Image (cartoon, rainbow, N blue to C red):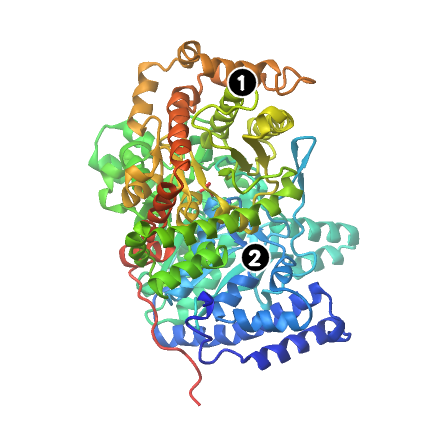
Amino acid sequence: MKNHDVAGRMADSPSREGLREAVRRQILSYTGSDPDRAGVRDVYRGLAFALREYLAEKWIETQRAYYESGAKRIYYLSLEFLVGRSLMSNILSLGLEDDARAVVESYGHSLDDIEEMEWDAGLGNGGLGRLASCFMDSLATQGFAAYGYGIRYDFGIFWQVIENGAQTERPDNWMRFGCPWQFERQGHLYPVQFGGSVRILHDEQGNERRIWVGSEHVLAVACDMLVPGYRNGKVINMRLWNAKASREFALDYFQRGDYVGAVEEKAKSENISKVLYPDDSRVQGQELRLKQQYFFVAATIQDIVRRSRKQSGGLAGMPDRVAVQLNDTHPAIAIPELMRVLVDEEELNWDDAWSICVRTFAYTNHTILPEALEHWPVETMQRVLPRHMEIIYEINARFLQLVRRLHPGDDALAARLSIIDEDHGRRVRMAHLALVGSHMVNGVSALHTDLLRSSVFQDFHDMYPRRFVNMTNGVTPRRWMLQANPLLSDLITEAIGPGWETDLARLRDLRPLAEDAQFRQRWREVKFENKKRLSAYMLPRARVLAPPEFMFDVHVKRIHEYKRQLLNVLHVVTLYNRLRGAPPGECPLPCVPRVAIFGGKAAPAYAMAKLTIRLIHAVASVVNGDPHVSNYLRVAFVPNYCVSNAEKIIPGTDLSEQISTAGTEASGTGNMKFAMNGALTIGTMDGATVEMAKEIGDEHFFIFGLHTPEVAALKARGYDPRRIYDADRELRLAVDMIANGHFSPREPGLFEPIRQSWLDDGDKYMVMADYRSYVEAQERAAHLYQDREEWTRVSILNTAGMGYFSSDRTIAQYAREIWGAEPVTGSGARKK
Ligand SMILES: *Cc1c(COP(=O)(O)O)cnc(C)c1O
């Protein structure tokens, strides 16, 4: 039984013959040549365009239904959408798997080969961008009148290539062969301006009006990517803006006879949507980044205001008709922008405009790492957005007035709460702007939200306790189970019946099956197949042979010190030393052959992250090259970790590494994808992993390390990493080998900065402190892995406990507690 066709094709999906005809037509009109001789790329494009046409029809119907229902509109503003590929996900949502397969096979290609033709849409860095894409899927699937807004970067997240064991970055020219899923809406253009100055005018009544006259102009062109709901006939869109030079502006130059200057200026303004900034959890603070933020916000607010005007209640009724969710502070400039539109252009009074703003916006915080909190120098803001700087000052003045009224004389409190940081060269604290200008702020896991309340934003919490809510992240089971792991999905459907894909809590029905030896056998076979597939995928890429009988111990995510890939490397070196210390051919207990699999991109300017990639390769080369050791231990680095290779890696994982320093990972979503696919987790009590352990049961988890309060207490008490190093022989040996060039004989000092960060610079992420506890947790994991039946039982219980972590649950919670929105019922299909 094929899981994907349990629900069958939807009533009005194209028939197989209809699809066949549409694909043929599209190939003909695209290639202009004989469809019977179409190559694999032509068939991919033909199929994609055929599906796009169908999605467009459904999109029109959906939009009509939303319009007629008067439902509250949800706008999800995000500078990142990590979409990945769309072909398979669209096919599954439309229920067309068997038909698509039959059609492409009639051209002599397999659907798998066709799938590989698609380039990932990597318009995001990592978790934050991928969350936005999971949310789009859940919003569509639950039938919310929702829109994603972002930027259509010409270049997404860089393509990572490994050369001589180090990362190099290649531009991600993802639209080289076009992107068949987009519609450019040439008619949907909005002007956006920058720079210039603020003019003060007086109207007939003598009221002052402030009008911003920019010195730089650019047009935002809408480009829509359609997102179908899962088998519900609904299609929503992400509207991604592209910067185009403004025609009038160029004309002005041309009239002055400066032809070359005009062309240069045109190229410069189009740079705004050129490239995604490749920094995850670190801000760089370039002016172009601020321009990107404003560019996308200004176009989006114009689109929202245009649509809101048509809704009942007009702009005053906006908060009842519209909810705007800010994905991190990246779009927070939307708050002063909406104020500017309402006050300067619509001529509302300040208080009415402010009330509309606060009730419309809500803000999601994604991190408490200080290096990730955005703050723009006042001087930059003034230069790029002079009117917004005035508005921010006004917002702040009124806010601080309130603070002083509530806490007279407490200047320190006012300084801490102020939107302007006066201590670091006058900066706008974007998180404070977002907190003041929103009616709700949410963290992304229970632990993270508690930390927002009790530490970073404690003063705000004291002032607005009801503003803080938790929305634990989730991921979409359509992509991360159905699509990525068809074998497991089919087995689950066979066991508990269909419907769990949209009601993930039903996975709990798997629990009793964990006791069924026959079911365990089948579960194990599925994992083994997925490991074989992963092994074949890795061989040419990581150039390591990973036998599927080995334990696959996987650590894939952005490379960052707080995520502690280095702790994992210390464990690998420890295993290596134990193997070397054992008599030849013997394996120290508990003897479990394993492949340590790594993957992840380092921000190009992040030296320690790049050095970590070099260390992993250096260790891999020594470990894999020692025949004595490599019978039991291998190390592999899968280059260019991205959504499409995550879909291959995750289903083949036995052990999932989620080992960030407690209190640093806001939620994590990789952790969820692994556990849904039957991996066991070795992890710290951090982010949403805490909640996963609670849902699944601590006893089915390998938890280790300091907890958040212990990290804080140890730091307060005076943490001495050197003492731990001195006292632990195995740790000392591993650290010394890394520092002394055992893994880099030709460059012995290469990894010295790593030793230094641990022993001389305070070991900010407590690697020394958690080492021993981590090694012991790894021993527990190895021990359990030797008991195949027990491991499989726990694997089943992991999947069974993951129902809570569907993004459907998260979205339903946002809708209820933040947006006050309900799904739209009714189809919008034209009555015949
Ligand atoms: C899910 C995902 C992430 C986030 O992973 P974390 O382990 O939560 O950091 C990053 N990149 C890709 C490609 C993903 O699919």
Which residue lies at the image location 47% right of the left edge and 32% below the top edge? 592
Could you tell which of marks 1 and 2 lies nearer the N-terminus?
2
State the CA–CA distance, disc 1 to disc 2. 49 Å
Give the crowd class for mark 2: few <14, some 14-19, many >=20 residues within 10 Å. Answer: some
Name the mark nearer the viewer: 1 or 2.
1
Mark 2: which amino acid? Arg
Q: Which residue is mark 2?
A: 85
Vertical comparison of 745 with 269: above or below: above
Residue 583 has which mark?
1
Residue 589 in sight:
yes
Of helix, strand and loop, which one carries label 2? loop
| Quarter in which the N terminus is drawn | bottom left
Between residues 437 and 389, which one lies in front from this camera angle? 437
Q: Position of residue 386 (x, y in %)?
A: 50, 44
Vertical comparison of 47 with 785: above or below: below
The answer to whether mark 2 is within 8 Å of ligand 1 is no
Horizontal arrangement in the rendering, residue 195 relative to residue 445 (left or right): right
Residue 756 in sight:
no
| Quarter in which the C terminus is drawn | bottom left
Horizontal arrangement in the rendering, residue 302 relative to residue 247 (left or right): left
Residue 445: image quadrant is top left
Q: Position of residue 653 (x, y in %)?
A: 48, 43
Task: Please identify the residue farthest to the bottom as the structure is shown.
Answer: 832
Residue 704: image quadrant is top left
Of helix, strand and loop, which one carries label 1? loop
